[in-house]
Image (spheres, rainbow, N blue to C red):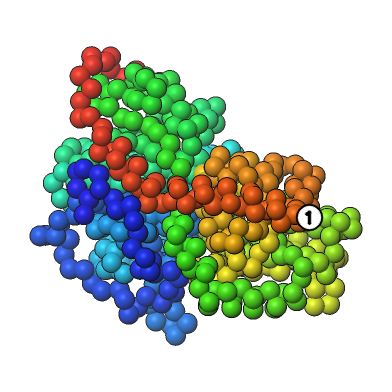
Amino acid sequence: MLGRAPGVRTILPAGDLGWGKPDMRARAQPRGLYGEGVPNDLVIVANRLPVDRVELDDGEPGWRRSPGGLVTAIEPVMRANQGVWIGWPGGTEKGLEPFEDDGMSLVPMSMSDEEISGHYEGFSNGTLWPLYHDLVAKPEFHREWWDAYVGVNKRFAERAAELASEGATVWVHDYQMQLVPQMLRELRPDLRVGFYLHIPFPPAELFQQLPWRRQILEGLLGADLVGFQLPGAAQNFVRLVRQRVGHKTHRDLVYLPDGRTVRAKAFPISIDAAGFEALAQTPEVADRAAEIRAALGSPRKVFLGIDRLDYTKGIVARLRAFSELIRDGHLDVEDAVFVQVAVPSREQVEQYRILRDDIDRLVGRINGDLGRIGRPAISYLHSSYPREEMAALYRMADIMVVTPYRDGMNLVAKEYVACRFEDDGALVLSEFAGAAEELRQAWLVNPYDINGMKAALLEAFRAEDRDLTKRMKAMRKTIRQHDVAAWADSFMTDLGDIRSSHGKPVRPARRS
Ligand code: G6P
């Protein structure tokens, strides 16, 4: 159990990670009343719950694992600790009660249609997401979206304040919840509050465009510890706090006029490496991997891309690079196939719909131009899969291609490495994914440079076994040492270390 002091278990319980269970009807048990006699020493606040409310094939309501890196990372941490997770289960269903799922206590927060379009699709994914990802798409600024964002953050903060026990730790996650730390501190000054941003934090030049820049910075400063994926992001934040809010800063510390110190630091997130490796080694996954390869027509080599269908992921450019290698005669469809899995995401947001159409058209054109009967150049799947299937895909693929234009970390790259227990396989990785700072032995590419990408794909395709083994061994060592338990442990340790008062006289904040 986590209290004020750190104490996340570093060893995850083997075999109790409930990988990929689409129908959770039978397991979800009502949890009873929260805040009444049940001490909640650790409260997780995230926009999403780890499970989504869905309609099952038989028309009955059920639960399915939510998409994305945040859930992948937090789920094993929650399982290894007693805590309660507050989040939105998707959809607009009201009145869902708190429930237990596989050892996790989940508190669903409903959202209205207006909140979904203003807070989730609007401010979170139409404003902040593109702004924080290097303006890969154009962010839109709408005052109604901002109002909805404030309203939803307030409701989440109030719920967390109700549920947290005296002196508890509350860990707030990601860009959809940046105002929660400050709101929570106002409601419950006794709490220790951590915040972690799973996506990049932009340079000051971009962040400055945001009409509500000061409110966001102040929202985050309600936390004792603000965590980022990379050191550059933490530096961007501290610099902005100094420039825009006017607080005194020193290295990674911000000194607030009320005596509090806030620390901003990088904690590169990771995966349950041992769990993934164990899964990849099971006979079921081995059989499935062989089956997939056979279904693909047993090509000599298989390239693989697995992404949420998002414009930051660089799917179009990567497929184009691959197709040009075939067109130029460097690869042949008898020798190589590209399997691209695109997990449906944010389908109500216009930019995502346009992207889906673009990819559909491109895949159709490439296969029409370059495929032969029974041998498409690209095998394209628009679907999400349970982890067993993901592990089978990782196991059967010779070359994993991860080429985002900008990505906080990218856990798919790490999952691939974790699954290559025979120290084989190649990783082609964008320099602009956070993971590139750790996985230096990958073929690193600039996703904007199509010729550079073509060269890297070809090199990875032609690489000798010895070279592959050397690279994969080194990457696997990194992933084993820096797994998700180590990540959570170091965040919690630092959160526990924050001093309550800095005792320095500081001038009041200047408005900008
Ligand atoms: C990324 C974000 C998460 C988000 C996930 C899925 O990993 O960092 O906060 O939950 O994408 O996106 P969605 O919009 O479906 O929650």
Q: Quadrant of residue 465?
A: bottom right
Residue 448 locus on image (x, y percent): 71, 42
Badge 1 local density, few (<14 within 10 Å), some, or many (20+)?
A: few
Q: Is residue 234 visible?
A: yes
At 52% across and 69% down in the image, what residue appears? Answer: 281
At 69% across and 43% down in the image, what residue appears? Answer: 445
Label 1 sits on a secondary structure element that is: helix
User: Where is the N terminus found, in terms of image quarters?
Assistant: bottom left
Q: How many marks?
A: 1
Single out the residue that lies furthest toward the bottom.
Answer: 58
Identify the residue under disc 1. 462
Q: Is residue 129 visible?
A: no
Single out the residue that lies furthest toward the left.
Answer: 37
In this rendering, would 108 be left or right of 297?
left
Residue 38 locus on image (x, y percent): 14, 60
Residue 198 locus on image (x, y percent): 45, 46
The residue under label 1 is which amino acid type? Answer: Arg
Rendered position, 48 above or below 379: above
At 59% across and 77% down in the image, what residue appears? Answer: 288
